Amino acid sequence: MGTAFDDTSRSRQPHRVAIPPAKPFLQTLKSNLKETLFPDDPFRELKKQPSASRKLLLGLQYFIPILEWAPRYTFAFFRADLVAGITIASLAVPQGISYAQLASLPPIVGLYSSFVPPLVYAMLGSSRDVAVGTVAVASLLISTMLGKEVSPVENPKLYFQLAVTATFFAGVFEASLGFLRLGFIVDFLSHATIVGFMSGAATVVCLQQLKGILGLVHFTHETDIVSVMRSIFTQTHQWRWESGILGCCFLFFLLTTRYFSKRKSYFFWINAMAPLTSVVLGSVLVYFTHAEKHGVQVIGNLKKGLNPLSITDLAFGSPHLMVAIKTGIITGIIALAEGVAVGRSFAQYKNYHIDGNKEMIAFGTMNIVGSLTSCYLTSGPFSRTAVNYNAGCKTAVSNIVMAVAVMFTLLFLTPLFHYTPLVVLSSIIMAAMLGLIDYEAAFHLWKVDKYDFAVCLGAYVGVVFGSVETGLVIAVAISLVRMLLFLARPKTGLLGNIPNSMIYRSMDQYPNAESVPGVMILQIDAPVYFANANYLRERISRWIDEEEDKLKSRGGSSLQFVILDMTC
């Protein structure tokens, strides 16, 4: 039983407060599960509807967002989405071919992956700005993880089968997280983790592209910087100066266009068109100079036609199935973290909200469908989404426009890419990856939180000097250790009164804050539970002992009250 004081009573007589009745276990469990898995109560609108047909319609609109916004779609929106879709298509074609090369897959697979998945996302995605396509980091992961088991050169058919199988399991994993409302798991990849990991992966990808820039045929399958540098400098006699000059020229062109687009935002279209321009110029140059006969490698023939079905290519009975599952889960996590983070970032710019669980279902579904139509892993890459945003997109229809443009390319234009030099594709990848090395964010982390900087640096070093998987494990491990330390060893501090106010702040941060005579106010920055109860008891006792010793040394009044501020 407890007591409370009635402020309206002048006598200040205590009265008893009854212990609240215990709730049934099932009711408590239901309430806790609802708060954990459905904090936004997504089906609250359905409860208000009187008819079953209306509930069915709202349910379909929830799971298929295009049914909700399509009736309000206007011609003005279409004009904006048409321009944005054509703009990102000009980026999707060269990037799709380039990233397929990075994944050690046929270039045509990169174009397939820019056709079907965007159509699926346009129906299921909740973001107006995300532009769907292949991503460099996931492409590198697929190449390194699957390439250790099966050679893409010696056994390209089996390698392709494992790639689409890994994509299938990535989609199943992503969709499962969304359906089970477990999207909060992705939040364990903190901002510092993502910055370090993406910067490290971008560095590794850039180093890998030196193979194409220098015209090397044989190259290491390892991704760490030591192996890559050894592979480069032990083959100096095989460097092709023609390829090197061509690569440096196109890389300079791409970086220059990006520089001007950053200086003047209305020049964004120059940066967006630069990769396709590089492909066209490189192809024309090789065609008229016959550079392919002088050591400049080209793409070769690309098969015309739309995506062939790949249901029979899913290697569920392969002895390498576990490798495909592992690759799918790891690449799925990375693609999901990037796609959701990119969607949320651009949604904040336009002041609207996206549902993380819906996004996971959309990404998962498009990868499942993609794996059945000769596509490999896709997500919402930052570079393509930024171009879509700057081009003035209004809805996900821009993805449909992009898919139609890629379909036109697959049906009629693929023979034009025969003479596209691989060195141009390497330059496109390098230019895109240099933009992902976010040193400014790393400097900001150093200024704000040294521990977050250590997480960022750990991820970067792990990726560059170990492997992509090693860097991810290191970053997540450091983040989890930090979270556990925060919970098990919460920060405590003294609060003091800011002069001439009723405000109390940390006396460490505000030196002018004054303590209340005879009263010690302690702030605890974490919830109290079994893992930190003993620590807090010992730490509070120490605060009391130190405060009493301080008061005795000054000859002041003794400590009378201890107030715990637990509003964390």
Image (cartoon, rainbow, N blue to C red):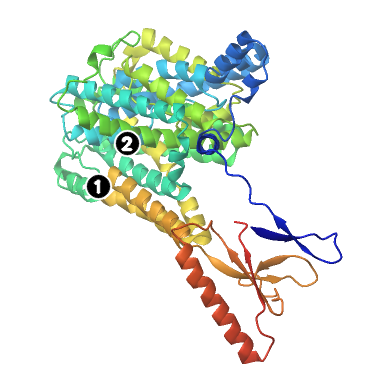
Residue 330: which disc? 2
Query: Which type of secondary structure does the marked residue at label 1 adopt?
Result: loop
Is residue 5 placed above or below 252 in the rendered structure? below
**Residue located at (70% from left, 66% from top):** 504
**In this figure, what is the number of numbered marks?**
2
Query: Which type of secondary structure does the marked residue at label 2 adopt?
Result: helix
Quadrant occupied by the C terminus: bottom right
The amino acid pointed to by label 2 is: Ile
Is residue 519 placed above or below 113 in the rendered structure? below
Marks 2/1: CA distance?
Answer: 18 Å
Label 2 Cα crowd, 10 Å radius (few <14 / some 14-19 / many 20+) = many
**Residue located at (43% from left, 40% from top):** 185
In terms of depth relative to the viewer, which is nearer, 117 or 270?
A: 117
Give residue 188's quadrant in the image.
Answer: top left
Side (left or right) of 198 relative to 59: left
Residue 224: which disc? 1
Q: Earlier in the sequence, mark 2 or mark 1?
A: 1
**Residue located at (29% from left, 43% from top):** 469
The amino acid pointed to by label 1 is: Asp
